[in-house]
Amino acid sequence: MLIAIIIVAAIVVVTRTDYRDYFAATQFINFLLGPATVALAIPLARSARLVKENLAGVGLALFAGSVTSTISGLGLVWLFGGSRTVALSMAPKAATTPVAAAVSSQIGGVPALTAALAIVGGIVAAVVGRTMLTRLNVNDWRAHGLAAGVAGSGIAAAQVAARSEPGAAFAALGIGLNGVLVGIWCRSLRSSGGDEIDRSRHPERCRQCDTSRNCPDWDDERHVLPPEGSNWRRLRCVLS
């Protein structure tokens, strides 16, 4: 999979193919991401009893994983001085690619960037996930499957599914519910309120392009501030 991505990317760059043309020509492959993810419901249905027996642990892992992935994505962007748009594109990256792109478009991110980040994250999870869990003496395929699902990695989930049907069931559960939770956290981050920050230490910024209000290029007609007391301001204060 990783080799195929590198080869295709190299061909697109060398032939100077416009991304929009490439995407239009490969829309059917992109469409198949949805059915491929839904197909994981088959082993989930077969292992329903096993899932019910482990529901408490699964719920705790899903909550911790979805919150950590969302906050860590935002934190990395702020740490390296990225814009608000990049941060909102990064936040839903741990959801499976179709869900992540849809959430990104709803909260003001760039769906194409989010999809790229989700794909890269899925590849990383597939490459290092199993090895890391094995070194930590985690040998239960249910845990491997759930970890792949919470990482939003269809590749890792497919690897687990080839070895264990219960593992595939937990991967399907992780992918589905993690997508729901990531969507909730990202939507609440955009819309819910928070405490107002110290404007002398944290200058107001445009919610569209992240330009500071103290910048000489500021234009009240062209730039728009985030709502008063929004979570964007609160998290910017906490993470800066």
Image (cartoon, helix red, strand yellow):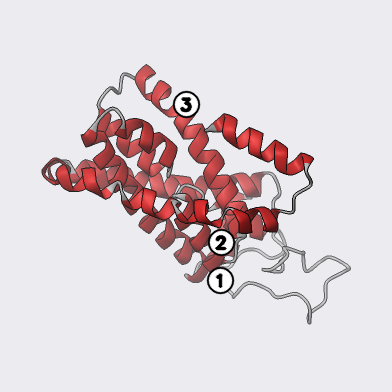
Looking at the image, which residue is at 42% across and 45% down?
A: 152
Q: Label 1 sits on what residue type? A: Gly
Question: Is 26 rendered above or below residue 137?
Answer: below
Query: How crowded is the residue under tag 3: few (<14 C-alpha within 10 Å), some, or many (20+)?
Result: few
Name the residue tied to disc 3: 128
Secondary structure type for disc 1: loop
In screen coordinates, is 170 left or right of 134? left
In screen coordinates, is 190 left or right of 175? right
Q: Label 2 sits on what residue type? A: Arg
In the rendered image, residue 59, in percent from the top left (x then y), is placed at: 26, 47
Counting labels gives 3
In the rendered image, residue 209, in percent from the top left (x then y), is placed at: 73, 65
Q: Label 3 sits on what residue type? A: Val
| Label 1–label 2 contact, CB within 8 A | yes
Question: Is 123 rendered above or below residue 240?
Answer: above
Res. 92 in view? no
Nearer the observer: mark 2 or 3; the answer is 3
Residue 155: quarter of image: top left
Residue 167: quarter of image: top left
The circle on residue 234 is: 2
Q: Earlier along the polypeptide chain: callout 2 or callout 3?
A: 3
| Label 3–label 1 contact, CB within 8 A | no
Q: Earlier along the polypeptide chain: callout 1 or callout 2?
A: 1
Secondary structure type for disc 3: helix
**Mark 2 and mark 3: Cα distance apart in space:** 34 Å
Nearer the observer: mark 3 or 1; the answer is 3
**Mark 1 and mark 2: Cα distance apart in space:** 7 Å
Name the residue tied to disc 1: 229
Residue 6: quarter of image: top right
Question: Is 221 rendered above or below residue 185?
Answer: below
In the rendered image, residue 128, in percent from the top left (x then y), is placed at: 47, 26
Query: How crowded is the residue under tag 2: few (<14 C-alpha within 10 Å), some, or many (20+)?
Result: some
